[in-house]
Image: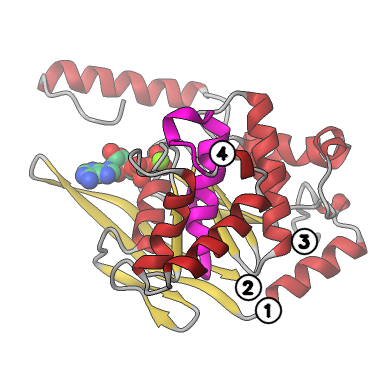
Amino acid sequence: MLKNIHPLAAWYTPEIKDRNARILQRPKALTISNLHKTFEHKGKKINVLNSIDFTAYKREFVCVVGPSGCGKSTLARLIAGLETHEVGAIHIDDDLVDGPGPDRGMVFQSYSLFPWMTVKQNVMFGLTESGMSRNAAEAEAFQWIDLVGLEKFANAYPHQLSGGMKQRVAIIRALANQPKILLMDEPFAALDPQNRLKMQRYLLEIWQNIDITIFFITHDLDEAIYLADRILILEANPGRVQETLSVPLPRPRKEETLLSPEFLATKEYLEKLVHPPTTEVDMEDKLSMVRMVSVNSEVPDIF
Ligand code: ADP
Ligand code: MG
């Protein structure tokens, strides 16, 4: 009997297969095991994440995609130790996550810089907090500021920076603390397409030069394919792993990558998984929900 052939199988060249195989042989950086998360809402329990199993390997770039509300941000917050879960475990290397810690850096969509501190002070903050001398912290901060080309803005305040600049500072501020993993939740979603692409390039360049594993959430499929080694695809209600896809593109990624046939094939494949066309059956389901609403006159939260 014919085995099921993956629709992207033809794009996995021997080099790409070899690279992917080597990533999976590296030590584990993040291990999520049988993770369940339930929220209580108006007295009802909502199962947001259901039995999530996933491993990211050292220096891997993982992107997470999935429909809105499937639990992507919740997953990032759980890894960050900002939420608690009922069942399962999260490990960074071999350490069990049971609260926030310096081994995880976070960058959110909304700018999380301290508005009353300059760029330099923002980057130095975590360093002096962890006991580094002011001089050493300042020298370290300057290196990071140089790396993202913001030397001229070292003494500027966040409100004097563009959105892209603010996110560059947010990234280096997180990285200066030398986390093992960088958690990014839609960090470029508020930027215009041109700046977004610029930031993606910056991030790839930084990632290539330092020892960091990146767990990057996005709803932009182009962004996920351009950045990731592997894409974790979640589905909703409850959030669970639909597929883990190794991206069939060589590195380094270039802008031409975005126009290559393998890129477009991957995008088409992901589109079908993440935004399946609404079928008549779906419509029928929705209609019955509407009927249910009018009968029970209680609006369910799913819309
Ligand atoms: P995503 O980031 O994929 O859009 P989220 O993780 O933000 O999804 O949310 C997943 C689901 O969990 C949503 O239905 C959301 O309403 C619910 N949710 C998130 N945070 C809370 C909370 N603190 N209390 C109750 N429900 C929540
Ligand atoms: Mg979210």
Secondary structure under tag 3 reads: loop
Magenta residue check for 181: yes
Kind of residue indicated by mark 3: Lys
Q: Are marks 1 and 2 in contact (CB under 8 Å)?
A: yes
Instruction: Please say whether residue 179 is visible from this viewpoint.
Output: no
Q: Which is more foreground, mark 3 or mark 4?
A: 4
Kind of residue indicated by mark 4: Phe
Residue drawn at (81%, 67%), measured in percent from left and top?
Answer: 19
Residue drawn at (63%, 59%), measured in percent from left and top?
Answer: 143
Kind of residue indicated by mark 1: Arg
Q: Tell me residue 269's x, y (percent).
A: 70, 39
Residue range corresponding to the magenta coloring: 155-184
Residue drawn at (35%, 38%), measured in percent from left and top?
Answer: 115
Q: Which residue lies furthest to the bottom in this view?
A: 94
The image quadrant that residue 283 belongs to is top left
Specify which label sits upstream in the sequence, 2 or 4.
2
Mark 4 Cα-neighbour bin, 10 Å: few <14, some 14–19, many ≥20: some
The quadrant of the picture occupied by the N terminus is bottom right
Q: Tell me residue 278's x, y (percent).
A: 52, 24
Instruction: Please say whether residue 301 is visible from this viewpoint.
Output: yes
Q: Name the residue under label 4.
A: 153
Secondary structure under tag 2 reads: loop
Q: Name the residue under label 1.
A: 26
